[in-house]
Image (cartoon, grey):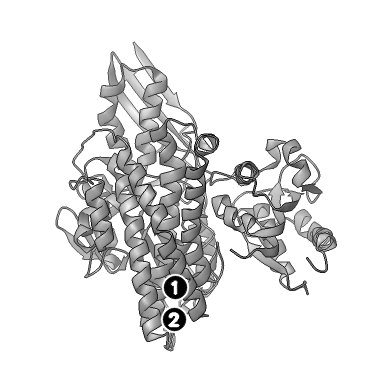
Amino acid sequence: MSQRIKLDYLTRIEGHAHLVIERKAGKVTGCRLEVVETPRFFEALLQGRHYSDVATIVARVCGVCSISHTLASLMATEAALKIEVPPAAQLLRRLLSYGEIVQSHLLQLYFMAVPDYLGAASLFQLLDAQPELVRRALRLKRVGNRICEVIGGRPIHPVTTCLGGFSTKPEVGQLKQLRQELVASLPDLEATVELFAEFEYPQFSRQREAISLQANGRYPLHGSILTSSSGESCSVADYRTQIEEYLLPHSTAKLARSRSGSYMVGAQARVRNGAGHLSPMAKKVAEALQLEQSGNNPFENLKARLVEVIHCIEESLHVIDELLLHGMPRINSNSTPVVGGSGTAAVEAPRGLLFHRYEYAADGLLQQADCVIPTAQNLASIEADIQLLLPQLLDQPEELLRQQLEMLIRAYDPCLSCSTHLVKLDLA
Amino acid sequence: MTRTQLRIIGIGNPLMGDDGLGIAVIEQLQQHQLPPCVELIDGGCGGLSLVPLLTECRLAIIIDAADFGANPGSIKTLTTADLSQIPAQIFRPSSHQPGLADVLQLLKKLNELPQLTMFFMQVANCRQGYGLSGQVRAALPDLIAEIRRVIPPTV
């Protein structure tokens, strides 16, 4: 007897997806994650745009990772046009990235994961029973937004970022206040660590490759070298030699594979490749949470995210101190763009590696864009995990099975809203 | 935390046709002379980032694209008092949940809702593509006039 299980509209993930499982005589014969998020042809939208407009358009691709898209876009154009970025501007960009990681991770941890582990349908359902927990979640999420507000000039879409650096610098008073707010968030973070230390994480293990930017004296964030847990590394500009993109008929998203097949990007991959460079406080939290080092249990992603939140807050304090100590003598480039040519950049977005690659014509108009988003790189890994996990769950009632699979998928924090290359395939 | 007096927040995505009308309104209002107590916010796709923005002001005006089955460009105005009567369908499904409806519910439950005026404009299409439809673009001056009418000279 063959049976088809379809989980429509997986909840609490960004964007929409269906999971289709086919089984015959008690065995799983097929498993597909169907991505049905409205396609966004933003690569096509970029064609013909002037290099000065590209980052502004890209910023709108994703409401959650707009800073990462903006920074990857600016860096790719800067690489193509040979625009240098002064050190103070690089520090400000790091701060912006930290802010985005903090607010994105806390959104996933509190709003997507906590309900799973406390047995609630959503965080809103916990409002009556645990109002303080919800208030804490909102206070913490605000901290990330505040970094964006002070450095980016706006709480949501940054307006101060530009090619070569920044158009305006934050005021010293604002930086000092931000510093105080970050320090003031530490008790809430401590309570969060206590909360996540109490959860029981599902046991699961599948060997996998982890790819991230290389920790070059610092935990992976912005950089020019890719590294794999398999020991290989290459220049970001050569990412296509390591990562191949492909399409499948059941998904409107573009997938990616490495030479060894599926691989993982994101918090867990970064911790695996760069744990030695975590901040002292983050290392202690990793120990307290007993973060598993092999990186083979995707449920441990939650702990990895929390460890990164602590790391980003602590690093933000150091960056602010550096900015206050040395001032910001120059925050914008004084080099003249060399128009024409191609450039590639990668940043560690909250969900993992994000690549932007542009080709510009001599008139400064964009000819071709390629964007590889973290979720596209994780989709194959999610499917492989489900295929391994399913046989252990098939005897359980469908509701329980659904819950377990959704928890697994949510552990990756997939964001399908900006899945690019969404080619419509007609198979009639 | 200090409370800003009046925040005007436009929500939407300019890459999705008329969905970006809230952002277009904010851009146009930036060219207007407004009282100094007014802060204009490009709310992007909104979501939970709206929470602190709404809790730290006394009055808020939200502008969003909506589909309430009217002619494209039609305007629907709602206030805090109407919140419980708003049909869920008026809030366009957000690609990033929780959406505006959830955010408002949450704030109401936490007793932190500011005094709110919401302007929804009926969209013509929200398919991928940069820029507004002709009908929505033609109706924006009316919407901006209505918004200006509810901005008090001082707050």
Badge 1 element:
strand
| Residue at position x 34%, y 10% in the image | A1
Count the numbered circles shown. 2
Residue A336: x, y in percent? 44, 88
Q: Quadrant of the C terminus of chain B?
A: bottom right
Residue to which mark 1 is pinned: A360
Badge 2 element:
loop
Whether residue A372 can be seen here? no
Residue B101: x, y in percent? 64, 43
Q: Quadrant of residue A75?
A: bottom left
Residue A393: x, y in percent? 30, 22
Residue A263: x, y in percent? 26, 47
- Vertical placement of A146 versus B88: above or below? below
- Taking depth in this image into account, of B112 and A105 the one nearest to the observer is B112
| Left or right position of A307 against B41 | left
Marks 1 and 2 in Cβ contact (< 8 Å): yes
Q: Amino acid at mark 1?
A: Tyr
- Vertical placement of A33 versus B146: above or below? above
**The residue marked by circle 2 belongs to what chain?**
A
How packed mark 1 is, by other alpha carbons closer than 10 Å (few <14, some 14-19, many 20 or more), is many
- Vertical placement of A142 versus A209: above or below? below
Distance between the Cα atoms at labels 1 and 2?
Answer: 7 Å
Q: Quadrant of residue B4?
A: bottom right
Residue to which mark 2 is pinned: A339
